[in-house]
Amino acid sequence: MKSSQHILFTGGTGFFGRSLLRCWLKSYVAGIVYPTVTILTRSSQGFLACYPEFADQPWLSFHNGDICEPRTLPQDGSFTHILHAAADSTLGPQLNPLQRYDQIVSGTRNILDLAVSRGAKRFLFVSSGAVYGPQPFHLDRIPEDWNGIPDPLNPRNAYGIAKRAAEHLCALYGQKFAIEFVIARCFAFVGPDLPLDVHFAIGNFIRDALWHDEIIVNGDGSPQRSYLDQQDLARWLLALVEKGESGRAYNVGSDEAITIADLACLVRDIVAPRKQIRILGKANINAERNFYIPDITRAKNELGLDVRISLAEAIKATAEAASGAHQ
């Protein structure tokens, strides 16, 4: 059943985008309520060549453009909602810090201007847990009211600083133009659409378990992370679009911590039980505590959200999808 929503979705061809597109496609096939969606992408042709299941969908259209080039953005029509998730998080390390900052901050302002000109009243900005800076020793999980910040004098923190600045832009536009804005501070995720050959540890472990002689842990394995399956991610983001309180930030992720070493063991046990794990780094008892775990109490209490898919199930599904695609 088609809804009255028309969503402009930036970043709709990346990991987050494909997670949501698969969710909407299931809704369409099942006759459940689904919106009209326009994807802003730099190359719809390239995307559809890789993912032909999204071609010729009556609820889905594509607009070729770049968030950093205002003249390429949609110049007519209207949108009820904008879901702004565009940022090169996968290929981000290939950009220099100034390029990363400009892409996030200038790109967000351009999309906010588009929201004003196209009459969108609801704006979801996909931010990051990186806005909090290092997780302090006294916090096992980071709540949304923790106002830590990455060191602004360190260029390596361009991503987190830029996301924080872009959040502030949302607040400024919300005040001036009465746009209902919601912030999704996203942590770490896993699922069949996760690339296995970039800088994501869990993806690298799954790749190693499938095709390499051993599973390599580059550090000492002591950092702690948590992972939300991409189906849960899609469900959470849609809840924020629909029901998130305007002017409020919500952590998006799992609160179930696991060390990187234990994660490698879990991947090994699920995917390749006989494979060896090699830890390259030496433990440093003086090293800064390295946690990246969200407190998701707000999302649970205010929006009724929960973690439905276990990490083990998510790893298994990711490995099976990768193995099938490799054949």
Image: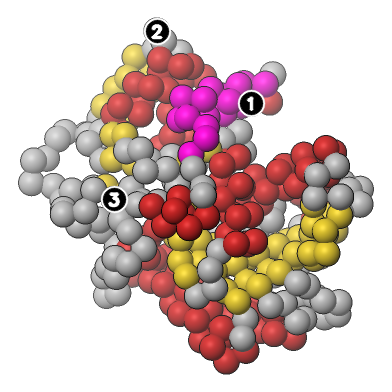
Q: CA distance from mark 2 to mark 3?
A: 34 Å
Q: Is residue 244 visible?
A: yes
Give the residue displayed 43% in from the left and 39% down from the top: 227
Q: Which residue is mark 1?
A: 321
196, above or below 4, in the image = above
Q: Which residues are magenta?
A: 307-324
Label at residue 274: 2
**Amino acid residing under circle 1:** Ala
Q: Secondary structure at mark 1?
A: helix
Q: Give 110 or 167, whichever is nearer the viewer.
A: 167
103, above or below 317, in the image = below
Position of the C terminus by quadrant: top right
238, above or below 118, in the image = above
Q: Give 303 or 161, whichever is nearer the viewer.
A: 303
Point out residue 29 in the picture as x, y percentages from the top left corner. 85, 38
Q: Nearer the viewer, mark 3 or mark 1?
A: 3
Point out residue 205 in the picture as x, y percentages from the top left corner. 43, 28
Q: Secondary structure at mark 2?
A: loop
Q: Is residue 42 visible?
A: no
Q: Secondary structure at mark 3?
A: loop
